[in-house]
Amino acid sequence: MSEKLDTFQRQPLIVGNWKMSLLTEEAVKQASVLRDSLNGQTAVEVMLAPSFPSLSHVHNVVQGSGLRVVAQDMSVHESGAHTGEVAPDMLLTSGCTGVILGHSERRAQSSETDDLVGRKAVLALARGLFPIVCVGESASERESWNTSEVLERQLAGAFPSAIDDMICQQGYEFAVAYEPVWAIGSGKVATPEVAEESCLFIRKWLEERFNLKVATATRLLYGGSVKPNNSQELFQEKNIDGALVGGASLHAEMFYQIISLAPGFKKENTVK
Ligand code: PGA
């Protein structure tokens, strides 16, 4: 990989995945506390992923603050007879600018396949949503030394050829979150070395699959038991550009601390 990748500055990105944990009133409160604490800082990009019914409410309180609202999933269909599904345009009209795709909980609990994640990624980009594609191996896959094969398979599924033109010619952006399944919600964070190794693998894969420019510009996140006491050393790794945070994002103060540890964050600009 070229030298240039080492020197390129990517804006840190921290995403809070609230899963199915907060009622709308609680989500709105968290978002407004965070909005006030961050006080318009722009060094670190921050995205909040509330559940579907809270999206527009959270959007209303963060509008104009720089905080972005993203969804936790979306339908693979654009519209029509799909009971219980939420279309990409519905996300856009709720104020969403992005969507998490292929989270391991959706893969495990809703049988999402690599192919489905890829079709959703194509649709998300085509509709103007920023996809945050999740990949990561299970404990048994890591124990049997299959991590790179799993990542490769998931990445190949998430980026089918239908996506090439949008990414390579039109310059549409996306992020990839490396989330080892064994680290999610378990309190067992990956070591910075393990997380960096996988993120470097993903970046090299993106370079081979697309080109150096795409690999250089794409932000890679680590996710899985990120807390204020382990985030700084993760953020120091060259290929980790931020975090996808679950449990710790449910506490505004803890989430703020994680954001404030990202490179470039300026505390003096914030009110507490
Ligand atoms: P966690 O969740 O931070 O609670 O481990 C991360 C995620 O599921 O994205």
Image (cartoon, rainbow, N blue to C red):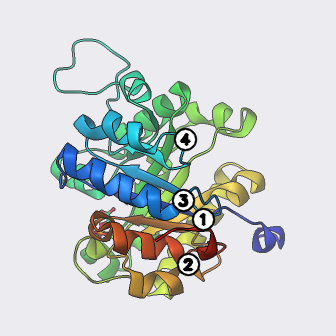
* Rendering quadrant holding ligand 1: bottom left
> How far separated are the C-alphas under marks 1 and 4?
19 Å
Which image quadrant is residue 238 in? bottom right
Labels 1, 3: front one: 3
Label 4 or label 3, whichever comes before in sequence order: 3
Q: Secondary structure at mark 2?
A: helix
Which image quadrant is residue 105 in? bottom left
Q: For the residue marked with disc 2, what is the amino acid?
A: Phe
Mark seen at residue 64: 4
180 is higher (above) or lower (below) than 22: below
Q: Secondary structure at mark 1?
A: loop
Q: Evaluate whether residue 44 shows in this view.
A: yes
The residue drawn where x is 26% and y is 76% is 139
> How far separated are the C-alphas under marks 4 and 3?
11 Å
129 or 32, which lies in front? 32
Label 3 or label 2, whichever comes before in sequence order: 3
Label 1 or label 4, whichever comes before in sequence order: 1
Q: For the residue marked with disc 3, what is the amino acid?
A: Asn
Do tag 4 and tag 3 residues touch (Cβ < 8 Å)? Answer: no
> How far separated are the C-alphas under marks 3 and 2?
22 Å
Question: Would you say the beta carbon of the disc 3 residue lies within 8 angstroms of ligand 1?
Answer: no
Labels 2, 4: front one: 4
Mark seen at residue 39: 3
Q: Total number of numbered labels?
A: 4
The residue drawn where x is 50% and y is 50% is 67
